[in-house]
Image (spheres, rainbow, N blue to C red):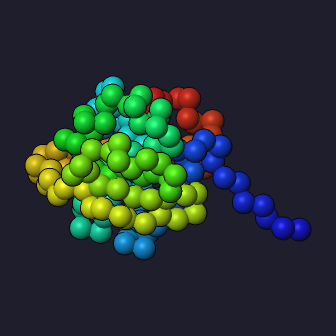
Amino acid sequence: MSLEETLPPMPGQRLARGVARALRQFDFVTVEELVPTPGLRVDLMALGPKGEIWVIECKSSRADFRADQKWQGYLEWCDRFFWAVDQDFPTDLLPEGSGLILADAYDAEIIRMGADTPLPAARRKVMLQKFARHAALRLQGYRDPGVAGLVSI
């Protein structure tokens, strides 16, 4: 009997999976769909070995990118910001100065580093706590799916 790999259904989720896998080689851990503040939800947040916080927005098409009106609001919640796209994405649409990651469901490559804009200490503390709680709630939800509806994130 063979184990068949199950890929996430949505193209953006597949990109997030590949980015998360690739960032492990740099000792980063990731969570998907973290809410840094009400009204914003990042596709992927990565936490580095020295406490670095990166936000990665996954865009699967030109229309997906053009529909995103909130991405600039993510900049104040991370040390570096990246776009993750596949090899067919028209990268000339992406704003200069932002990071660029080429990805698929299995791997990714950092093409351009995002600008380094270190978070203030108080904001970093808040984001580390949000990251930890988000990861713990996800883990608890996997371990005990019935508890997910008891509390909101």
Displayed quadrant of residue 48: bottom left
The residue under the point 35% across, 64% down is 111
Q: Is residue 66 above or below residue 141?
A: above
- Choose top left, top right, bottom left or bottom right for residue 47: bottom left
When the figure is inspected, residue 142 is found, relative to residue 67, above or below; the finding is below
The residue shown at (47%, 48%) is: 89
Res. 109 in view:
yes
Position in image of residue 5 (x %, y %):
72, 60
Residue lying at the far top of the rendered structure: 39
Q: Which residue occupies the extreme bottom position in the image?
A: 25
Image quarter in which the C terminus is found: top left
Residue sitting nearer the eye, 57 or 64: 64
The quadrant in which the N terminus is found is: bottom right
Count of numbered marks:
0
- Residue 2 horizontal side relative to residue 52, left or right: right
Q: Would you identify the image quadrant in which residue 93 lies? A: top left
Q: Check the image and name the residue furthest to the right.
A: 1
User: Depth check: 62 or 106 in front?
Assistant: 62
Q: Residue at x 58, y 57 (%)?
A: 105
Relative side of 132 to 104, left or right: left
Residue at 84% x, 67% y is 2
Q: Position of residue 30 (x, y in %)?
A: 42, 56
In front of the other: 101 or 75: 101
Classify 78 as above or below 65. below
Q: Report x, y in % for residue 92.
A: 35, 47
Regarding residue 32, the answer to whether it shows in the image is no
In front: 140, or 26?
26
> As drawn, is 110 to the left or to the right of 17?
left
Q: Position of residue 90 (x, y in %)?
A: 43, 47
Q: Is residue 81 left or right of residue 42?
A: left
